[in-house]
Amino acid sequence: TQLLEQSPQFLSIQEGENLTVYCNSSSVFSSLQWYRQEPGEGPVLLVTVVTGGEVKKLKRLTFQFGDARKDSSLHITAAQPGDTGLYLCAGGGNEKLTFGTGTRLTIIP
Amino acid sequence: SQTIHQWPATLVQPVGSPLSLECTVEGTSNPNLYWYRQAAGRGLQLLFYSVGIGQISSEVPQNLSASRPQDRQFILSSKKLLLSDSGFYLCAWSPGGLYEQYFGPGTRLTVT
């Protein structure tokens, strides 16, 4: 069974600070996605990474796929209240995704 | 552009009653379709997925079932609901390939 562990589970920081969320597994994935979910809504895709060592930037968000394609990180620079939400990583393979345990991020104005 | 619909948005059902949740996708053909359940503030548990009409793969043995009667329609059902079936149910579609998935708005199910 493939498992994706995210850390931290909860994170509450002040506006303007930087943060990093981690997504770790013992399994190799074909691709790795990051999603953000607001309460009562479905997750929204932020990014897909497919190559080991790949780095993608989306404004203040930086995503990295580990060299061995087993782990990933999400770094947010100068966090804003609009970044608040549940962040989910998901590993792809065999026509389906395995979702991580989630990180609840709260940015305090 | 593609659109995914789920209904109803919320549902309150007594224990032992049947369930039918529907999901439809517009603007694409032959999508992969998925049903997930999510506990409050946590990750998503894959329940069923389908890569074509009539093709259903079950990930977790339980009293739920899924069907895909048409290319862009995916239905989640139960004959008798349990209290443990309460949760947030999400439908998603994928064009395949890189496994990116696009989610519907979800159904909040409360079994009383």
Image: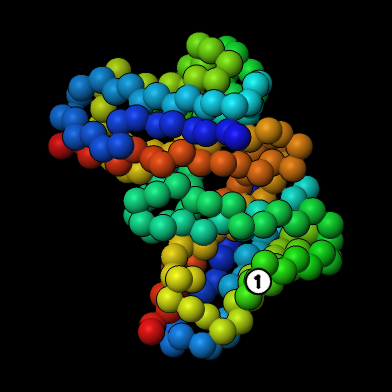
**A99 sits to left or right of B62:** right
Q: Residue furthest front?
A: B1
At 49% from the left and 33% from the top, the residue drawn is: B4
Tell me where residue B12 appears, x and y as whole percent: 19, 34
Residue A1 in sight in this render:
no
**A65 sits to left or right of B53:** right
> Which of the 4 image quarters holds residue B85?
top left
For the C terminus of chain A, the image quarter is: bottom left
At 44% from the left and 31% from the top, the residue drawn is: B5
**B22 sits to left or right of A44:** left
The crowding category of the residue bearing disc 1, from other C-alpha atoms within 10 Å (few below 14, some 14 to 19, many at least 20), is few
Tell me where residue B1 appears, x and y as whole percent: 60, 34
Question: Please, is residue B15 above or below residue B52 in the view?
Answer: below
**B67 sits to left or right of A76:** left
**A101 vs A58, nearest the viewer:** A58
Chain under disc 1: A
Residue B32 in sight in this render:
yes
Disc 1 element:
loop
At 74% from the left and 50% from the top, the residue drawn is: A31
Residue at image mark 1: A59
Figure disc tally: 1
For the N terminus of chain A, the image quarter is: top right
**B109 vs B101, nearest the viewer:** B101
At 61% from the left and 47% from the top, the residue drawn is: A98
Tell me where residue A45 appears, x and y as whole percent: 59, 52
**A8 vs A17, nearest the viewer:** A17
Q: Give amino acid for label 1.
A: Lys
